[in-house]
Amino acid sequence: MSSALTDLFPHPIVQAPMAGGPSGPQLAAAVSDAGGLGFLAAGYKTADGMYQEIKQLRGLTGRPFGVNVFVPQPENAESGAVDLYAQQLAGEATWYDTELGDREHGRDDGYDAKLAVLLDDPVPAVSFHFGVPAREVVDSLHRAGTFVLVTATTVEEALAVERSGADAVIAQGVEAGGHQGSHRNAVAHDGAGIGVLSLVAQVREATGVPVVAAGGIMRGGQIAAVLAAGASAAQLGTAFLATPESGAHALHKQALTDPLFTHTELTRAFSGRQARGLVNRFLREHGPYAPAAYPEVHHLTAPLRRAAAKAGDPQGMALWAGQGHRMARALPAGQLVEVLVAELGAAATALSARSAFGGDPR
Ligand SMILES: Cc1cc2nc3c(=O)[nH]c(=O)nc-3n(C[C@H](O)[C@H](O)[C@H](O)COP(=O)(O)O)c2cc1C
């Protein structure tokens, strides 16, 4: 059996895995060294690319860390819709002087090969996004001594995570930046997202597994709030995006606090799956009709996003961000962990002072 969550790292702070470049070995090492749990993102990487990062991270820190894996997606029934979307994006390809990507690029993200690496040379923690791994996968990771976490966005999904035998559920609220880790890419569920505080409390009541809260958490006071709601730790993505150790594009980092970007929305425009990003031109123009086809749309738009970044145009990039983006701080990641821990302590002190007044200090 794997160790308890709190045995892995002293502070209740998990640095969210962020595929596409932001969370590499430097960021994960800085967070783990500071007493949080750093994470590598294996999404969009080959099994070998993932393994190279694991080895690099081990050279940077002796502290525990995690690796995040995308669960393979079922065949999508909307290939006609992808063709239509490709036609609708033709003008973007002309504008950015590039071609659309290969939508048949592959569906499973190298899942089996990545699991084989993680079983062959185990890491302290593995988390899964976009679905629930098979019971045998969880069991074999446990035999390897690995702590297993799985994202859920609803109570029903959290119950499925519990049935899988996983050690913890990551309760991802609708505020979260990047992709919602919903177990199905169902349009029928759009707009039904639950806020993190409510989700944590509901998952705690419905399941017996420890909960890690994710979504919109930028300050230690918010960590105190999710712990009070029953979480064992908080997982922060956007808060770590702006740190110097984050590999996010400089324009992405700047955009988080740029008053030009006033708010975020969930969109399928860039990947075909619901993900929260800063509202920019591409999201506004294509979000309303982008099909529920992941990862086809992700591969289709990849060259557009790359070309926009190369051209220095944030209006064509996927600027993933949670609802708390304007509170991002460009502190070194280890220092950010320290500040969050101090804020958490201050919030706990304020709460106990409040209860000394019978809960009403007026
Ligand atoms: C840029 C970015 C990339 C992300 N990529 C992943 C990923 O690869 N795997 C994953 O499990 N979650 C991913 N997420 C979601 C986070 O795990 C987490 O749910 C989210 O960051 C929490 O919300 P916050 O960004 O408001 O803190 C990503 C989030 C962001 C902002």
Image: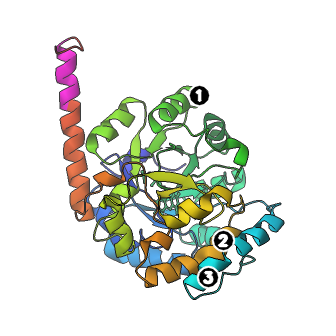
Q: Quadrant of the C terminus?
A: top left
> Quick one: label 1 or label 2, which is nearer the N terminus?
2
Q: CA distance from mark 3 to mark 1?
A: 47 Å
Asked if the residue at label 3 sits under 8 Å from ligand 1, the reply is no
**Residue at the outermost bottom position:** 97
Task: Looking at the picture, tell me which residue is in the foreground, 147 or 67.
Answer: 67
- Give, as a single range, the part of the protein colored magenta: 349-357
Q: Which residue is mark 2?
A: 109
Report the residue marked by disc 1: 206
Q: Residues within 10 Å of mark 2 (few under 14, many from 20)?
A: many
Q: Is residue 149 above or below residue 159?
A: below
Q: Residue furthest top?
A: 358
Q: Is residue 352 left or right of residue 319?
A: left
Which amino acid type is marked by label 3? Ala
Q: Amino acid at mark 2?
A: Asp
The three-letter amino acid code for the residue at tag 1 is: Ala
Residue visible at 45% across and 79% down in the picture = 309
- Dot 3 corresponds to which residue? 93
User: Is any atom of residue 262 visible in this view?
Assistant: yes
Q: Is residue 26 above or below residue 328?
A: below
* CA separation in Å, label 2 and label 3: 25 Å
* Residue 315 counted in the magenta span: no
